[in-house]
Amino acid sequence: MSNLISDEFLDYIISQKSDILPDGSPGVNLAFDEIYDFLCGFYNTFPAKSERLLLSAYIGVCKKLPLSWNNYEALAFCLNSLYPNTDLLEISDEEVIQKVIALLNFTEANVPPPDDIATAIITIWVDIYYNWEL
């Protein structure tokens, strides 16, 4: 099933969705139903509608897009994917900022982070960690 989430497929989604990363949006403008429709069209098949598969595609898209501080939801998905065993009760704001700046697709490494951005990222990261089956 995970072989459906190829780089070519992720690039296809990004190329087909012109408003995928609206200015100032905390996340990626992409619903799971849209991902499923893209899957069906790209592979010319109708795979089982799996939340895990759709979430993998969503995370893959997040990791390919150029993200900024405003995209704190997408940043949280990226961080959870890369650092799944992080102790979120012990992580400091500075550690979160450093992990974000280290993301290859993060475009604002030289821009000071907004106040409370680490808290926003951690809040969403905690929600992902405890409420999404990855």
Image (cartoon, rainbow, N blue to C red):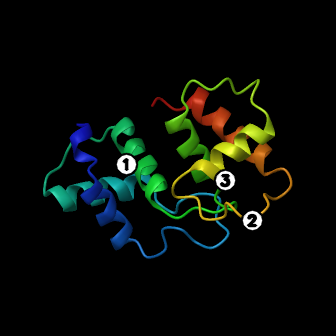
Q: Which mark is residue 72?
A: 3
Outermost residue on the bottom side: it is: 18
Residue at figure coordinates x 56%, y 36% from the top left: 80
Tell me which amino acid carries mark 3.
Answer: Tyr
Q: Which structural element holds mark 2?
A: loop
> Do the residues under discs 3 and 1 have CB atoms within 8 angstroms?
no
Residue 70: quadrant of the picture: bottom right
Of the numbered discs 2 and 3, the one sitting upstream in the chain is 3
Label 2 neighbour load within 10 Å: few <14, some 14-19, many 20+ = few
The residues bearing labels 1 and 2 have C-alpha atoms spaced at a distance of 29 Å
Name the residue tied to disc 2: 111
Q: Which structural element holds mark 1?
A: helix
Of the numbered discs 3 and 1, the one sitting upstream in the chain is 1
> Do the residues under discs 2 and 3 have CB atoms within 8 angstroms?
no
Outermost residue on the left side: it is: 44
In the image, is 118 to the left or to the right of 48?
right
Name the residue tied to disc 1: 57
Of the numbered discs 1 and 2, the one sitting upstream in the chain is 1
Front: mark 1 or 2:
2
Tell me which amino acid carries mark 1.
Answer: Ala
Tell me which amino acid carries mark 2.
Answer: Val
In the image, is 86 to the left or to the right of 118?
left
- Give the percent coordinates (x, y) of residue 82: 51, 37
Residue 108: quadrant of the picture: bottom right
- Give the percent coordinates (x, y) of residue 18: 43, 76
Residue 125: quadrant of the picture: top right
Residue at figure coordinates x 69%, y 45% from the top left: 98
